Image (tube, rainbow, N blue to C red):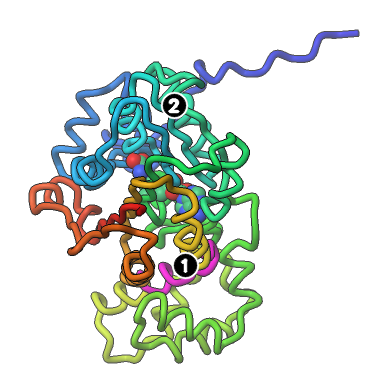
Amino acid sequence: MTDPLPEPNPAHRRRPRYRGTHPRGFREKYKEHAPELYPEHTEHVRARGMTPAGQHVPILVEEVLAVLALQPGERGVDCTLGYGGHSRRFLERLAPGGQLLALDVDPLELPKTQARLRTLGFGEEALCVRRTNFAGLRAALAELDWSAGVDFVFADLGVSSMQIDDPARGFSFKCDAPLDMRMNPARGPSAAQWLERVETVELARALQDDADEPFAQRIAAGLVARRGRLRTTLELAAAIRSLLPAHVDEEQAERSTRRVFQAVRIEVNDEFGVLDTLLRALPECLRSGGRAALLSFHSGEDRRVKKAFEAGLRSGVYSACSPDLIRAAPEEQRANPRAAPAKLRWARRT
Ligand SMILES: C[S@@+](CC[C@H](N)C(=O)[O-])C[C@H]1O[C@@H](n2cnc3c(N)ncnc32)[C@H](O)[C@@H]1O
């Protein structure tokens, strides 16, 4: 019997060719994808207020650390590991002896982040990574025998820069790609499949409630009439533009397109549904004195967090919660425009 052919060694894979002198496409930016090899290049991109391709710049880190007040030896959860920026700082604060459970639904990015954190020296004893939806937080804690409650729970809601910037994931209308938008592409219908099935009333409700789209009704009716022809990001973007009234200028059209993409993404990933489940489970997941911090980027998310924390304060499950919204300072917003919409709230378990 002949030996099977050896697997090609990824270390020797050719880097993608690009036109011109500078890489422009997401996958061509090989230096940004390998910050450990090209740290100066990453710094250079960051200094221009941009997020390097394949990375995510963590938001409101110092503010999150301040409200969570982590102590060495504590145990807690990062519900949204992403690129691991927040988790890394938590792990530094929890040492020695602390433990972090980090969750994420994304099967493509999770292994990369886990490997990066392991390389930085965070072993199994300090960091446990699970590909799990945070709606299942209670079950994830039970699996580790942590059902008595943890010292802190953190969630940084929404999508990561790696997801939104990678054209292949279908979140953005800047490039053409299959219309996917799933944080876990192995689960549930893609955005294209969802648009195939959704009824006008439900779509109009989503565009109105999830994105405050002023032309929700006409866009919804028009998209439903175009069923079967909305398979890629650019097909959806072109359809949205064609459905807007003639007086709408380019800038307004771009805003409507952004809003429709946001609403479809929220629905495809059931972002409000899983947040509601997490907020209901939180009090039971925190030990007495435990802290929760939630970072949201959408008024619909923030309203839910505020309502849940205030209701918990009234009922006595929380002894305190953020009196005001915490936002990124102007310097952070300048350095990372993606920090501009961020809203941080916290609560402390009685
Ligand atoms: C904004 S990013 C988090 C960035 C991270 N804090 C960092 O410093 O890199 C959000 C991450 O949460 C994940 N996510 C979103 N909803 C989730 C859910 N319901 N359960 C688990 N992970 C989720 C996304 O896949 C994404 O990786």
- Residue 264 seen in render: yes
Give the residue pinned by disc 2. Answer: 15
**Residue 171 shown left or right of residue 336 in the figure:** right
Tag 2 or tag 1, which sits nearer the N-term?
Answer: 2
Seen from the viewer's position, the closer of residues 67 and 189 is: 67
Question: Tag 2: Cα neighbours inside 10 Å, few (<14), some, or many (≥20)?
Answer: few
User: How many numbered tags mark residues here?
Assistant: 2
Say which mark, if any, is on residue 31. Answer: none
**Residue, x 42% and y 32% (percent of image)?**
17
**Residue, x 45% and y 46% (percent of image)?**
79
**Residue 165 is one of the magenta-drawn residues:** no
Within 8 Å of ligand 1, the CB of disc 1? no
**Residue 73 shown left or right of residue 198 in the figure:** left
Seen from the viewer's position, the closer of residues 165 and 312 is: 312
Say which mark, if any, is on residue 272. Answer: 1
Which residues make up the magenta segment? 258-270
